[in-house]
Amino acid sequence: MVQVVEDVEIIERVAALDIGKAEVVCCVRVPDESRSGRGAGRGQHVRTFATMTRSLTDLSDWLTGLRVTRVVMEATSDYWKPPFYLLEAAGFDVWLVNAHEVKHLPGRPKTDALDAVWPCKIAERQMIRASFVPPAPIRQLRDLTRYRIDLIGDRGREKNRVEKLPEDAGIKLSVVASDLFGVSGRAMMDALIAGERDPDILADLARTRLRARIPELREALTGHFTDHHGFLLSQMLRHVDHLDGRIAAVEAQIEDHIRPYADTVARLDQIPGIGPAAAGMTIAEIGIDMTRFPTAAHLASWAKFSPTVKESAGKTKGSAATGRGNRYLARALGEAAVGASRTNTFLGERYRRVARRRGKQRALVAIGRSILTVIWHLLSDPDATFNDLGADHYDNRGSTQRGLRRHVNALHALGFTVTITPTG
């Protein structure tokens, strides 16, 4: 319900939460039923609840009794999730808002109660915007894809430790073998752990193409590898194997959760640089319902793939940096942009053209935004299909049209009237 007071649209019954780890302070603003008529004011109620589920249920019942329709809360660490999910399930219109937009005004006292009152006042006047929170199935998929990224990062760090440890013993295996965790490299490390120290025997464990470099392997495997190094290496390899198993288990869960979106993944997979993994991660971060983003520009702005605008007194300020957005989405789009840059497609040619003028980093951001724009159109229209314009698009159309405009404008400046007639 909406009531209009002095031409200002007011949310009639609204609540705001200031959430901590142990307590949540709730401020509710509703019509003051003790006063009636044109001069009726607003009633304000502030109560504190524990963050345990039973107390949050009491909070939900209290808000229901006051007939609150919208509840806003600041994104505070992960503490916002329990009250958000519980109130969402209870049927409230729950908004998660950016902490920057509800920052308390300077010069005023700061308490938990006032931190709840202030967002409640600006929320009832609709002076804040809701942040994007995907529906529950997408949230579950997002948890899995993000956890996989974290596990892959942990595995990469442990593999770096494995590579550095033999250096302490004078073993230079990584200089000769490009992949320590290949069949040959792993066999040699297992033999070192088992107590083998003879470089000839260790080098003879090489397989396939690495056997051509056995003399170099003998040199690389000559060192002072001790049982101390063997113990550390065994623990590190066990950890890597353990992480491999956990990653495989998470990926199996991701496959189960992504199965309902298989058609969408297949459509996104047509974009150069986007594979099934990147498509799944993109869906996990932005969902499949693009009504939350009215245009592709809105999505690019939310993802921080658009330059910020800072203008005052007619002058543009700042470096036009995009800012920091969703790092998981940025990772997926960045990897897709790198992959697309190596293809003989429109996106690949666009990368090369931008890189020549603006540098490689800006070109990757530009390609990432182009990919995000394509994704928005594919998700907005189920009947839309991806059609590559081709690497010669600029030569066949863009450059030709620009050249024509340049020459025609130059002739107009000299006082000539030009009529363009194609030959052939």
Image: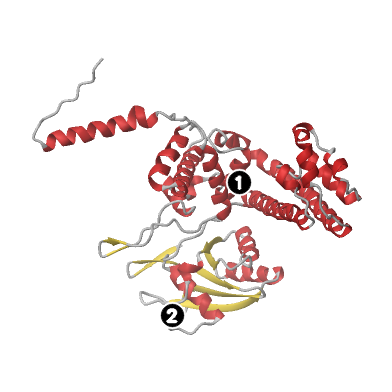
Residue 95 is left or right of residue 238, and the answer is left
Dot 2 corresponds to which residue? 106
Residue 77 vertical placement versus 241 (above, below): below
Residue 109 vertical placement versus 379 (above, below): below
Residue 385 vertical placement versus 356 (above, below): above
- Dividing the picture into quadrants, the one containing residue 393 is top left
Q: Residues within 10 Å of mark 2 (few under 14, many from 20)?
A: few
Task: Report x, y in % for residue 390.
Answer: 44, 29
Question: Which residue in the rendered view is the most extreme toward the left?
Answer: 415
Q: Residues within 10 Å of mark 1 (few under 14, many from 20)?
A: many
Q: Could you tell me which residue is drawn at 38 percent across and 59 percent down?
A: 319
Residue 241 is left or right of residue 388, and the answer is right
The reply to whether residue 50 is visible in this rendering is yes
Q: Which mark is residue 281?
A: 1
Q: Disc 1 on helix, strand or loop?
A: helix
Q: Could you tell me which residue is drawn at 48 percent across and 37 percent down?
A: 381
Residue 200 is left or right of residue 260, and the answer is right
Task: Report x, y in % for residue 76.
Answer: 58, 68
Question: Which residue in the rendered view is the most extreme toward the top?
Answer: 424
Task: Report x, y in % for residue 9.
Answer: 38, 65
The residue type indicated by label 1 comes to Met
